[in-house]
Image: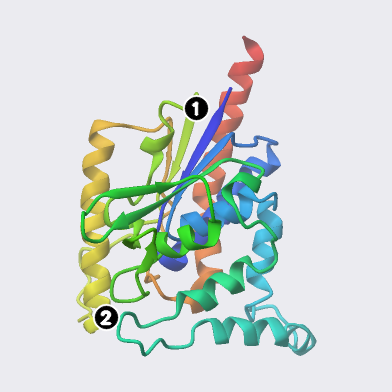
Amino acid sequence: MKLGIALGGGGVRGLAHIPILQVLDDLQMSPALISGTSMGAIVGALYASGMSAREIREIVEKRLILKNDTWRDVIEKREDLLKWVYAFKPDFSGSGLINAEGILNSLLNEIKVDCFENLNIPLFVVATDYWSAEEVVFNKGQLLPAIKASMAVPGVFSPVSIEGRILVDGGVVNLLPYDLLTSRVDFIIAVNVSRVRVASGREFPNALESVLGTFEIMQTTMLTDKLRRLKPDIYVWPQIRDVRMLDFGKIEEVFAQTVPAAEELRKALLTLLRKADSC
């Protein structure tokens, strides 16, 4: 069975893809194809390069002060912690608030893959053409520019120019690109890391949160419509609450809140494997 997995965008919540991929590793189910948008493209690229989910998680945790860390642990992590802080330096160019280059280098500097063609697993990365409003899908050529374009959230990260096209976040047109896999694999897992909104919430958003929150509402509405028309074989939506797109101080919470969804996926895949063995 040829397995494909789609990893959606959602800022820091996109790190929930790591424990989901860990389930595949545990069950020795290697995807034949990965598609990703925004943070899903970043995690997908790391995984497609040959890293295990556990190795990717270790890369992230080296850049965090965890609840159970001792002072010795913090001292040993100090260089990686400083790199992470530097990655979020402001961009005063006027086109974005955060310099995406530092974040990408921080997450991707431990792999040596430059091109899509050198990945262990084929990868599709989704971006949006700002002027034509078209979906742009990358699966060959330089890897880093494509990922930078895929995660260029309007108003937060600077747009990216590739071959004369001005590109922004792929989530503008395709938050969860499982549709790119439908004719290419036999079985599709789609992982949505959209924010779980609280209907009774009364918190008044600031200017940036208003922009990002509205952006997320639009994305979720489009995804809901697509799910009505086209369903993946397994749909995973970790119920991550109270974590905004740029809440990078809540990465541990993202991992913790993903556990139930990861376990549900494990059960579903074990059932699938048992059925396959009985045939």
Q: Residue at x 39, y 46 (%)?
A: 137
* Label 2 residue SS: helix
* Residue 245 rendering spot, x and y as whole percentages: 38, 70
Residue closest to the eye, 79 or 227: 79
Residue mark closest to the camera, 2 vs 1:
1
* Residue 258 rendering spot, x and y as whole percentages: 51, 56
Residue farthest to the front, as pictured: 164
According to the picture, the residue beneath numbered tag 1 turns out to be 185
Q: Residue at x 45, y 65 (%)?
A: 148
Q: Which mark is residue 208?
A: 2
Q: Residue at x 54, y 81 (%)?
A: 87
Residue farthest to the top, as pictured: 279
Q: Image quadrant of residue 99?
A: bottom left
Residue closest to the eye, 80 or 252: 80
The amino acid type of the residue labelled 1 equals Val
Q: Which mark is residue 209?
A: none
**Is residue 241 something that shows in the picture?**
no
Residue closest to the eye, 260 or 87: 87
Q: Is residue 92 left or right of residue 260?
A: left
Residue 34, compared with residue 1, is above or below; it is: below
Residue 47, compared with residue 61, is above or below; it is: above
Q: Is residue 99 left or right of residue 31?
A: left
Q: Is residue 54 left or right of residue 94?
A: right
Using the numbered discs, state the Cα–Cα distance from disc 2 to disc 1 in whole angstroms. Answer: 39 Å
* Residue 265 rendering spot, x and y as whole percentages: 53, 40
The amino acid type of the residue labelled 2 equals Leu
Q: Earlier in the sequence, mark 2 or mark 1?
A: 1
Marks counted in the figure total: 2
Colour convention of the picture = rainbow
Residue closest to the eye, 43 or 136: 136
